[in-house]
Amino acid sequence: MSFHGDVADWFADPARWSGPSGVPNRLWEHLLISGMAVGVAVVVGLPVAAWLGHQRRFGTLAMNVSNVGRAIPSFALLVLGAQLWGISELVWGLPTAALVALVLLALPPIVTNTYVGLAEVDDGIRDAARGMGMTSLQALWRAELPVAAPMVMNGVRVATLQVIATAGLAAVVAFGGLGRYIVDGIATRRFPQVFAGAVLVAGLALAAELVLSGLQRVATPKGVRLARRPIRKETPA
Amino acid sequence: MTLAAASDGWLWWPWVRDHTDDIVAALREHVELTVVAVVAGLVVSLPLAVAAHRWRWLRGPTLVVAGILYTIPSLAAFALLIPYTGLSRTTALLPLVTYTLFILVRAVLTGLDGVDRAVLDAADGMGYRRWRRLVRVELPLALPSIVAGLRLATVTTVGLVTVTSLITYGGLGQLIYEGFGRNFRTPVTVGVVLSVALAVVLDLLITGGARVAMPWTRRRS
């Protein structure tokens, strides 16, 4: 009872809601670095992966990149980033070490899902698009990408969730964000603050999941959505 | 520790030589946490997935709950448990187990769903009862998917264990964390290289074990 009372007091303290270490600013920092990292990963990774998937080339390379990416712990990426860039170097006003680590973390899911999504577009659809006189690029943009959209969006969703989770961990090396409350709280044994920080980080992740799965549904073209169900049943899982 | 300033490189062998015991202990803890978490996860996931396969209405809720647990960032999950289980091994293990649930339940379900209807009819025709059919026919046929899930769960867990260094468990993560804190690269390098190597070795062990357990999946010559 008293512990949860302390947590409630932590949230009730007006000092939590203003200033650089207040919740609004920490939340903003968290969202900003996550958005930047996913944005950079999308701009860099998505076109390349889409083009390779369209060509159906370098598939093993795309898969290996993502497998290696998965084997390197995200915590290790952050610390390695801090070793390479130090903890005070900034890019776009954000700590370089954390941003680079988060971009590297966001790339594998985006690359793999985009590649697989496009490589698995039905041959009939590709041929029909070309048969209608589309150029290779037009076919990619107007026929293949819409069909692959759910898969591509899934990659973006997975990447974003991973980045939001790891941005919290970035407080260990060189970053504000909501993880600050947890990391500092553990270091100073202020466990109500740790708990409050954990509630905020978990809440943010769950909210992001809700928003992104909604977006994933919206990004799926209507025709693909309708076609999906019967097709799914026939393919062995 | 006093030697830290003596080196600026990525790997300083004298430190490795002097701390072999610490490194081995960290590696052992990492392996223990990973294996216990994945095995416990499998023990919980199997009955859950089998139940969700048999009773359709259980499927949605099971996947939603496992999905929510999976979405909670590991740092937050550990922190949420501290008031209840303290800075203990339990606090480190519980989230590790719940993260494997989502992966493993889905993998088992996918495997069971993929079993051919005709095979089930044949098994029924041969007089298999429900449980025997499940154990002797359905689960073996679901094994490839279960193994794929096990591999993913294991590699993911190896990475997550490093995060538990924040609550003073963490195996190789402890080396990474301490090296970072003391601004000394060698433990960081050792921790990262060994955890990646551990992920690869465990993955190979599972794949190898799967080949032995599923002779029928080997290519016929």
Image (cartoon, coloured by chain):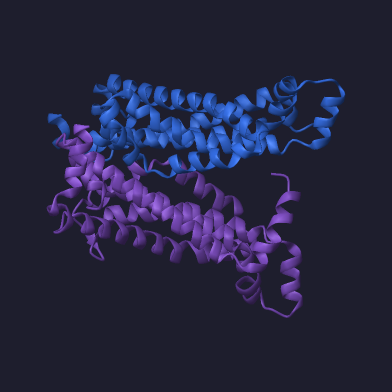
Q: Residue at x 25, y 48 (%)?
A: A82
Residue B212 in which image quadrant: top right
Location of residue A137 in the rendering, given as x and y in whole percent from the top left corner: 62, 75
Q: Is residue A136 left or right of residue A22?
A: right
Quadrant of the image containing the C terminus of chain A: top right
Give the total number of marks visible in the rendering: 0
Q: State which chain is coloured purple.
A: A
Q: Is residue A28 visible?
A: yes
> Against B205, is A31 above or below?
below
Name the quadrant containing residue B117.
top right
Quick one: B192 or B40, which is closer to the camera? B40
- Which of the pair A37/A72 is nearer the observer? A37
Q: Nearer the viewer, residue A70 or A55?
A: A70
- Chain drawn blue, letter? B
Q: Residue at x 68, y 34 (%)?
A: B112
- Residue farthest toward the bottom in the current orientation of the protein: A133
- Residue A93, compared with residue A79, is above or below; it is below
A135 w.r.t. B62: above or below: below
In the rendered view of the protein, which quadrant contains the N terminus of chain A?
top left
